[in-house]
Amino acid sequence: MSMINREVAWRVFAREFNDSTLEMEGTEERSPSYLVTPLGAKINRIYTVGVLTERENIGDPEEPMWRARVTDPTGTFFVSAGQYQPEVATTLGHMEPPLFVAVVGKSSTYQPDEDTFLTSIRAEMIKEVTEEQRDQWIIEAATSLKERLEVAIEASKMDEVSVEELVDLGFDENLAEGFKQANEHYDSLSFDKYERMLEDSLRYVLPEYETQSIEEIQEEKEGEDRRDEELESLVIDVISNLEEEEKLENGVEYERVKEKVMEEEDITEDEFEETVNNLRSDGKLYEPVLGNLKIIG
Amino acid sequence: MEENEELAPHIEDINRALNEKLSEEQIEEELRTYTDRYGVPLGSAKRSIVKKYEGDPQDLYVSTEKAIDDIGGDEQGLNLKCRIVSINEKEIEVDDEPKQIWYGILGDDTGTIPFTLWEAKPIELEKGDTVKIENAYANTWNDEPQVNIGSKASVKEIENDEVPQFERETQKLDLADIRENMQNLDVTARVTSIERKMVNTQDDEEKELFSGIMADETGKAQFSAWHDFGMEEGDVLRVKGGYVRSWRGIPQYSFDETAEVEFLDDEELPPAEELDEVSVYSISDLAKRGGAVDAIVDAVMIDIKSGSGLIFRCPECRRVVQKGACRVHGKVDGEADLRVKGILDDGTGALTVIINRELTEDILGYDLEEAMEKAKDEMNQSVIQDALEEKLIAQPLRVKGNITSDEYGLMLVADEVEYKTIDVEEEARKMLDEVRV
Ligand SMILES: [Zn+2]
């Protein structure tokens, strides 16, 4: 008897999910595609619980397309919900971050260019949950990761990764196959990294290791927002002062702006670049000639 | 054993296959040694002799009754002399029409094999009958050979002594390992529940059936005893000579008066409460097994399907009424009910769970009447489903019940539902200790 088996919802930490660069199409007609993680989780559906830190409607009010960020102890999941998930989109639209949320969704990938492989979750369900539920999820995700690491350790003792031998050792066939596929795709896998990740996420739920409360996350986020605003107005001030003083028609050279801003504020080059990019995407700056920055309006 | 005139065509057959390498007398002597002295079935004996003298058994073509143990896989024109070890009726659907088929187990002195009879019973067949089957075919199902008796086949009842009496060696097995169609098992288990009922057999006879659940240290199974052995709840039994039937994936250990039932000391198995603990299954294991009785699943509810909460059922057929109409009975006055139809997922697999009215009332904290009041106040039936989503989604649960499977996957009908509390701190410390090693 052939059974339709619903795709299992994997509990995988954000870091492992986002490290994935292998997508496998189903072998049979209408069979689902999978994102294969470096440790061989073959993810079609995923279940995660974390902190909703941001959400943004990149569609319009009529046809919303929500993008959200959900963080776990290891990184950030990018979550989306649009017209095909109207209930999820509505729920997400009413959520005010930060919040603990549970998300069930399908793994989704996007490859804007050859070197970039972006992963995200197309949400099928989102729900506000408690911190306890988040901690329980961490245990589930850690248990799942631990098992994949055990597969990796056993497999590393073999000359050639053998699904059969792994199954004989008591591992699930799906897990063993996933690991073999991952092993063929990802080169020089660093298991240490995931071992550390496992330990860190387990410590995360222990009282002796301080973790951030939702209020602290909020404060930190507000602090970051404040600094972003300060830096943006500093860059605007620097440009407008120079424009005025030197009567510049075609804006100010990028390097001069950077030098001046870095003199006045303790800011890294990356931070400066990000600030300029934000101002440009917000329509406050433009480039009248190559390499020059000018204020709009 | 065989009469001379019966052996003659086979002797000729062997002679031809061996290009007259041996004399007919030599062949007959060989044949008698195999069949009479060593009890090898005729078919096997012929093949062995041809092989022994470097011939090709493929060149044999006077068909013999095949020994059951020799049935390998895909074979046409199969002839058997055997006994019906068990026979059951089943209704299947062919081109939307219900069709009666029979299935069970055939046996001879070499072994047993499952069979399916696809056409109306040619004669009144019963358990214990000795039959001659001609022109059946064999195929494999779940890696096991099985005999198919189709429209081209014939079945005749023959004298009981045409198949030697056989006593098969029983196979000792844990309950976790029993599978559909196994037979002649030797199982030791504790009866954890039992009830007596009267059932009607195919011949409209009333028969006493004792059914319930038995458990050992590896799992649980339903059982059906077609004889009063005086079993009671709590008894530790050793049952030799039973066979396994399966209902939608749930294996069921069946036995009758031919089985040997031995009552053992209570200490032979742990108490019932302890045996209960072993029935926690991962969903991937359940998918491999196909089902389980009285099983425990620890999983998270990740979806609640529409048609949950406050629903209305057709008074005739209990189907859920949609927009005031039953799919079969049209416009009806639906009867209110409460239920949950959801998806449980434990990270190894997913299954559909059905939670009945009583348990749903427990989860909601109010009863059906109050649920109807709430729905009326809100002018919306779906408020109850919303309330259930609030209480259940993303919630680790421990659910106990029977698990069946069909083409739509696994289904768990809940007998008990409880919130599962995980001691996060303890689990984290335990795992940290393990990874540090
Ligand atoms: Zn009806």
Image (tube, coloured by chain):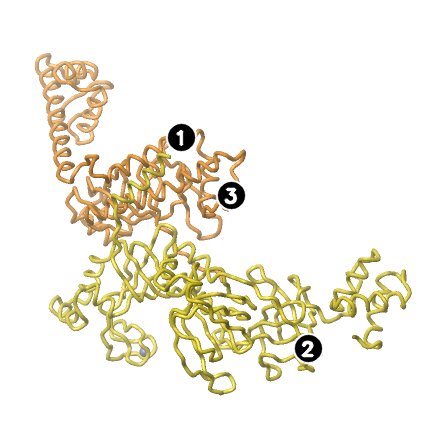
Chain colours: A orange, B yellow
Q: Which mark is residue A163?
A: 3
Of A157 and B391, which appears nearest the observer? A157
Q: Does dot 2 land on a helix, a strand or a loop?
A: strand
Q: Residue at x 44, y 63 (%)?
A: B268
Q: Position of residue B329 (x, y in %)?
A: 32, 80
Q: Check chain identity for marks 2 and 1: say if they share one.
A: no
Q: Tell me the distance, in whole angstroms, between the alpha carbons under discs 3 and 1.
A: 21 Å
Amino acid type, residue under disc 2 in the picture: Lys
Above or below, A201 against B133 in this view is above
State the image coordinates of residue A74 (x, y, percent, origin top left). Answer: 28, 36
- Residue occupying image coordinates x 20% and y 31%: A281
Q: CA distance from mark 2 to mark 1?
A: 66 Å
Mark 3 / mark 1, whichever is N-terminal: 3
In the rendered image, residue B230, in percent from the top left (x then y), is placed at 44, 78
Q: Amino acid at mark 3?
A: Val
From the image, tell me which residue sits under label 2: B132
From the viewer's perspective, tell me whether residue A183 is left or right of residue B346. Answer: right
Q: Nearer the viewer, residue A20 or B27?
A: B27
Tell me what residue is drawn at x 41 percent, y 72 percent. Answer: B212
Mark 3, ligand 1, within 8 Å: the answer is: no
Q: In whole angstroms, how far apart are the C-alphas of marks 2 and 3? A: 46 Å
Residue B287, x across and y down, in percent: 43, 57
Q: Is residue B125 above or below residue B113?
A: below
Do marks 2 and 3 share a subunit?
no
Instruction: Label 1, secondary structure: give it.
Output: loop
Q: For mark 3, does the 10 Å Cα neighbourhood hold few (<14), some (14 to 19), or many (20 or more) residues?
A: many
| Residue that badge 1 annotates | A190
Contact (CB < 8 A) between labels 2 and 1?
Answer: no
Q: Looking at the figure, which quarter contains the N terminus of chain B?
A: bottom right
